[in-house]
Image: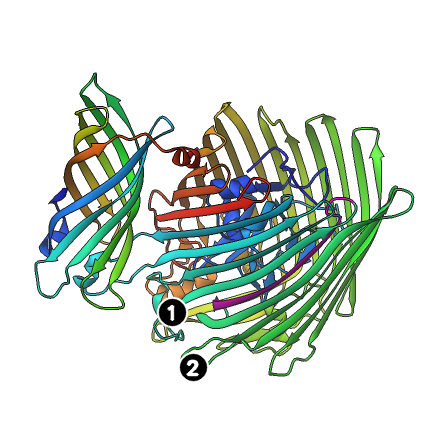
């Protein structure tokens, strides 16, 4: 679950709501690779601008440090496309732009499989003007063994 | 770029796709590693050639020492001669051929006397990949996004222009490989959207396809095949392409919507002769037609040309003879004073060995064009002081009738390019253009240690024929008003030095640095204008971190010094610097990650180009390029490795 906590110029026109994030992570060259998506709703503050859903599809890489037993810390970057789908103007209702994010996450390992995490990110979407956001995410992570076909594919 | 021989090459088993003095090589591995998707993309790795472009799809390029417009460089695909330009415009990305079909590309700047034709004005040699045994299929998609879209702010700011996606470029191919024959069919659908803010009004002037923004869309279908008792001794090429184009000519001053159709057929090969001799041949026939693309005023280029090229050479012991013939027939609805061009070149010479470590060549070429004759003398000497080193000295001098493959000479014969003004000084009675070239170089190749090369060049021009432009800006029509005339008597001298060094700092870290510096001595105004367009100093540095052969991280850093385009000075002042006639130096950083996955079935490249987001222009009338995000995915399946 991801609430946005800061906006730039966009704050005068849109109010962000909670969103969701899904990411799959796997070990990859000196660290971890992740891929996933984030969905946010931006509601219009004024009548002359439409509300929109923002869908960030990303791939990322980072490295972490595991403290004995319970905690681990991860820092990485994400790159992807920020896909904005506006509520109005049927037929010309979307925009896509490149986004770059820095991510830091702390995990609390409840068991070999289950963990709780809290994650912070700062993200820049390269629109003109820039759309800068920061967010906090909290959630549950599951650690599963990769199936053979996935290991073969990533090799 | 590699400094080791790739697995495959056709031109000559010993030298094809091996970097040499004045020759850069881009391998298939480089193409995947940097996520290139178009033929012109590979020129980013070259410092020997300089490149300019407007909208980001078509690029004009020329080798060192030849200011743009003065080089008639040659294009070969599997040794089949293919015309690279039509009406003076580079058509590389419109050809019925895909970069994904490539095994390697040679970018040749120095003199090439290997034949069948003698080349001293540069060449691009593309070698297609050899299909694997059995059936194989490949598909790829490459797309990108240039930053600075308005995003949600398009609803809040008074005037913003959407900068659209880059591409996508789709390719698909099927190959069959047998012991004595191979066939490869491929198709490409390539899009480029002309949405840059600087070009917006000009591109929209006549563009009118409802529901779309100005864009270029190329659809191509190509076939390459090979057969013969010796592997790939006979090769053929066929293809069709249809490009919905936005053709900018300096003469028109704006983008003319047009449909460019290309039909291409060619063959090349080698045949054995008696006494250990070899006959090589290359032949091609092409048809280029520019047709009406829907636009506001139904303007069209109204041009069609057919070209036939044949070249052959034979070597028997010390003797080397050969020739090249080319016919070009133009067609337009107006009257041409002469619709045919004929060009014949014949040469003969001697090759001699100097002990075991060197060889020398002396060749005389006779050139016949448009009823006038000329001759060029070529000489070269190569020495191999060590197993991994080579020295070369080569030169040429001669006077020949001007090469007639240019828009200006067709205009002189009566072709009317829409919205253009043309005046000619005439040149029939003037002395023949003369040119001199000198190349000198040294190369050291070591696959695991340090490799390096140095290349020195000189080009001299006398009585050259160059178009001279006077360009003004018409703000009401959002286009340039250009007056052009052909000027004879242009002359000057260019010279420079180029160097390359490649080394491995560790088994996983490869570094390569190359740079070219060239200087132009200015003899008269037209030559001054041409010389100033070249970035005098060009540097490219590549650092590749390859943890394994399946994953790499590459950084490409490029520098090009500032250029000036004096013919745009007036337009620049009139347009209040929207079109700057002086372009500042360029400093570009590209970062690419490339990963092979799923065995060898999948190759993914993801990269950022112009990472520093420095606004970059390659031409005063061109687009401004910002940071771009690129993604390319290639999927490959073979019957031997399993589907």
- The residue lying furthest to the top in this view is A68
Query: Is residue A14 visible to the viewer in this orientation of the structure?
Result: yes
Secondary structure mostly seen in magenta is strand
SS at badge 1: helix
Please tell me which residue is depicted at 48% across the width and 77% down the height of the picture: B419
The disc numbered 1 marks a residue on which chain?
B
Q: Earlier in the sequence, mark 2 or mark 1?
A: 1
On the image, which quarter does residue B451 sit in?
A: top right
Q: Label 1: which residue?
A: B202
- The answer to whether B54 appears left or right of A91 in the picture is right
Q: B7 and B613: which one is in front? A: B7
Q: Label 2: which residue?
A: B297
Please tell me which residue is depicted at 59% across the width and 62% down the height of the picture: B85
SS at badge 2: loop
Q: Position of residue B4 (x, y in %)?
A: 61, 33
Residue B239 falls within the magenta-colored stretch:
yes
The disc numbered 2 marks a residue on which chain?
B
- The answer to whether B532 appears left or right of A123 in the picture is right
Task: Give the extent of the magenta segment.
Answer: B230-250
On the image, which quarter does residue A107 sit in?
A: top left
Please tell me which residue is depicted at 54% across the width and 39% down the height of the picture: B29
Q: Position of residue A2 (x, y in %)?
A: 15, 42
């Amino acid at each position: 679950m991801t609430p946005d906590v800061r906006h730039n110029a966009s704050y005068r026109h849109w109010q962000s709501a909670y969103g969701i994030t899904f990411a799959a992570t796997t070990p990859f060259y000196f660290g971890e690779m992740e891929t996933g998506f984030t969905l946010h709703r931006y509601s219009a503050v004024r009548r002359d601008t439409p509300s929109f859903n923002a869908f960030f599809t990303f791939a990322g890489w980072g490295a972490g440090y595991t403290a004995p037993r319970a905690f681990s810390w991860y820092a990485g970057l994400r790159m992807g496309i920020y896909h904005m789908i506006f509520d109005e103007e049927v037929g010309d209702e979307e925009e896509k732009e490149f986004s770059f994010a820095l991510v830091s996450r702390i995990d609390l390992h409840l068991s070999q499989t289950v963990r709780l995490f809290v994650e912070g990110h700062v993200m820049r979407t390269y629109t003109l003007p820039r759309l800068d956001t920061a967010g906090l995410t909290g959630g549950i992570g599951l650690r599963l063994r990769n199936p053979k076909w996935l290991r073969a594919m990533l090799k | 770029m590699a400094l080791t021989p790739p697995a495959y090459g056709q031109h000559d088993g010993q030298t094809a796709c091996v970097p040499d003095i004045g020759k850069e090589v881009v391998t298939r591995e480089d193409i995947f590693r940097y996520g290139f998707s178009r033929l012109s993309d590979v020129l980013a790795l070259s410092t020997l050639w300089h490149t300019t472009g407007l909208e980001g799809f078509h690029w004009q390029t020329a080798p060192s020492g030849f200011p743009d417009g003065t080089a008639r460089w040659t294009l070969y695909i599997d040794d089949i001669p293919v015309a690279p330009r039509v009406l003076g415009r580079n058509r590389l990305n419109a050809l019925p051929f895909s970069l994904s079909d490539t095994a390697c590309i040679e970018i040749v700047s120095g003199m090439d006397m290997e034949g069948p034709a003698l080349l001293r004005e540069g060449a691009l040699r593309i070698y297609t990949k050899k299909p694997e045994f059995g059936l194989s299929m490949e598909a790829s998609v490459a797309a990108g996004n240039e930053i600075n879209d308005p995003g949600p702010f398009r609803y809040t700011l008074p005037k913003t222009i959407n900068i659209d996606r880059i591409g996508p470029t789709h390719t698909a191919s099927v190959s069959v490989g047998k012991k004595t024959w191979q066939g490869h069919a491929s198709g490409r659908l390539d899009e480029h959207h002309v949405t840059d803010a600087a070009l917006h009004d000009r591109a929209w002037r006549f563009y009118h396809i409802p529901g779309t923004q100005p864009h270029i869309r190329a659809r191509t279908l190509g076939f390459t095949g090979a057969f013969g008792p010796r592997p790939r001794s006979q090769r053929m090429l066929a293809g069709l392409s249809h490009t919905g184009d936005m053709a900018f000519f300096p003469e028109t001053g704006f983008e003319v919507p047009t449909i460019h159709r290309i039909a291409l057929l060619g063959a090349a090969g080698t045949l054995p002769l008696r006494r250990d001799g070899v006959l090589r041949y290359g032949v091609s026939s092409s048809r280029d037609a520019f047709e009406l693309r829907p636009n506001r005023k139904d303007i069209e280029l109204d041009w069609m040309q057919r070209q036939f090229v044949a070249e052959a050479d034979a070597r028997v012991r010390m003797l080397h003879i050969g020739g090249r013939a080319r016919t070009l027939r133009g067609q337009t609805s107006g009257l041409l004073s002469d619709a045919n061009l004929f060009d014949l070149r014949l040469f003969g010479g001697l090759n001699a060995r100097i002990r075991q470590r060197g060889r020398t060549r002396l060749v005389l070429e006779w050139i016949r064009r448009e009823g006038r004759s000329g001759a060029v003398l070529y000489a070269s000497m190569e020495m191999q002081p060590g197993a991994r080193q080579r020295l070369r000295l080569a030169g040429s001098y001669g006077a020949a009738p001007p090469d007639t493959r240019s828009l200006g000479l067709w205009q002189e014969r009566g072709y009317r390019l829409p919205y253009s003004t043309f005046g000619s000084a005439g040149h029939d009675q003037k002395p023949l253009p003369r040119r001199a070239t000198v190349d000198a170089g040294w190369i050291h190749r070591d696959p695991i240690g340090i490799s390096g090369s140095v290349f020195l060049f000189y080009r001299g021009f006398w009585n050259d024929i160059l178009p001279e432009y006077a360009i003004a800006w018409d703000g009401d029509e959002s286009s340039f008003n250009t007056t052009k005339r052909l000027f004879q008597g242009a002359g000057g001298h260019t010279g420079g030095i180029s160097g390359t060094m490649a080394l491995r700092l560790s088994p996983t870290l490869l570094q390569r640095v190359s740079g070219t510096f060239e200087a132009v001595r200015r003899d008269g105004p037209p030559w001054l204008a041409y010389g100033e367009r070249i970035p005098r100093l060009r540097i490219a540095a590549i650092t590749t971190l390859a943890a394994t052969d399946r994953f790499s991280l590459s950084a490409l850093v490029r520098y090009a010094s500032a250029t000036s385009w004096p013919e745009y000075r007036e337009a620049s002042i009139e347009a209040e610097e929207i079109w700057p006639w002086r372009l500042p130096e360029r400093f570009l950083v590209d970062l690419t990650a490339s990963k092979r996955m799923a065995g060898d079935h999948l190759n993914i490249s993801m990269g950022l180009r112009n990472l520093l987001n420095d606004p970059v222009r390659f031409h005063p009338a061109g687009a401004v390029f910002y940071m771009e995000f690129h993604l390319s995915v290639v999927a490959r399946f073979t019957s031997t490795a399993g589907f």
